[in-house]
Image (tube, grey):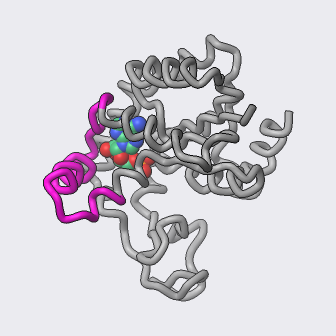
Amino acid sequence: MGRIFLFMGIQGAGKGTQAIRLAEKLGIPQISTGDIFRAIMKQDSPLGEELRAILNSGRLVSDEFTSQMVKDRIAQDDAQNGFILDGYPRTLPQVEHLDQMLAERGEKIDAVLFFDLDKDEAISRLANRRVCTANSNHTYHLIHNPPQQEGICDIDGAPLKQREDDTSEAIEKRISEYVNQTFPVVDTYKQRGIFHKIDARQSIDDVTRTMMEIAEK
Ligand code: AMP
């Protein structure tokens, strides 16, 4: 049976970067609900419009729609030997939806990795975040992880931009959504004994090392 990991943490904690690294190492997909929504947002459709409005304001997408997207995604061939869920579940109803999906598949969560970072540091990281316009997995921080050439991605030379939802109002809304909705989710997994907290203030490589140790257990 495949291995299933949940990655949680305040936005800006670096969980996306780390999820990509673990996914490569284990040969399983990293499934980010935020990435799924951003892909739909690019489409010129009513659904794209609707998601753009929700994401750019920093609110959460509905539990039903989010869970359906995850259910469809984990039904694909590449997810049959395990996967990493990055940014899901984020609310208590989503926890229930996931429990049900996994029960139907006869699977269980191996570990929940919580990337711990305080609110002020998270806000500062989001405000300084720049992403590559060609591949949103290539991310930079203007102070801690700047590109070699200002405004240009080191990996593919494409221009960098600020994420549309990294405005100060949207950041504030996302952080408050996180505190209200996602803290209870963290508590739920703590009680199940599959919870691991990682100090996300460490350097990116130190966080990776800690994460790999947990994943190898
Ligand atoms: P992220 O890329 O994880 O920062 O997510 C970006 C945005 O996508 C969030 O601010 C939400 O609007 C939406 N989103 C991502 N994951 C979820 C989720 N599990 N539940 C509801 N909305 C989500």
Quadrant of the image where one finds ligand 1: top left
Q: Nearer the viewer, residue 139 or 144?
A: 139
Determine whether, in the image, residue 47 is placed left or right of residue 195: left
**Residue sitting at x 56%, y 79%:** 147
Give the answer, above or below, for where 133 lies relative to 121: below
Q: Is residue 123 magenta?
A: no
**Residue sitting at x 38%, y 19%:** 93
Res. 211 image quadrant: top right
From the image, which quarter does the N terminus lie in? top right
Give the answer, above or below, for where 127 lies relative to 15: below
The outermost residue toward the top is: 191
Determine whether, in the image, residue 108 is placed left or right of residue 132: right
**Residue sitting at x 61%, y 39%:** 115
Query: Picture coordinates of residue 121 (x, y %)?
Result: 50, 48
Res. 182 image quadrant: top left
Q: Is residue 62 magenta?
A: yes
Q: Magenta stretch: dominant SS? A: helix
Determine whether, in the image, residue 190 is placed left or right of residue 59: right
**Residue sitting at x 56%, y 75%:** 146
Give the answer, above or below, for where 209 lies relative to 132: above
From the image, which quarter does the C terminus lie in? top right
Query: Picture coordinates of residue 163 (x, y %)?
Result: 36, 64
Q: Is residue 209 visible?
A: yes
What range of the chain is rendered magenta? 39-64
Mark count: 0
Q: Is residue 116 visible?
A: no
Query: Picture coordinates of residue 203 (x, y %)?
Result: 70, 56
Query: Picture coordinates of residue 103 (x, y %)?
Result: 57, 18
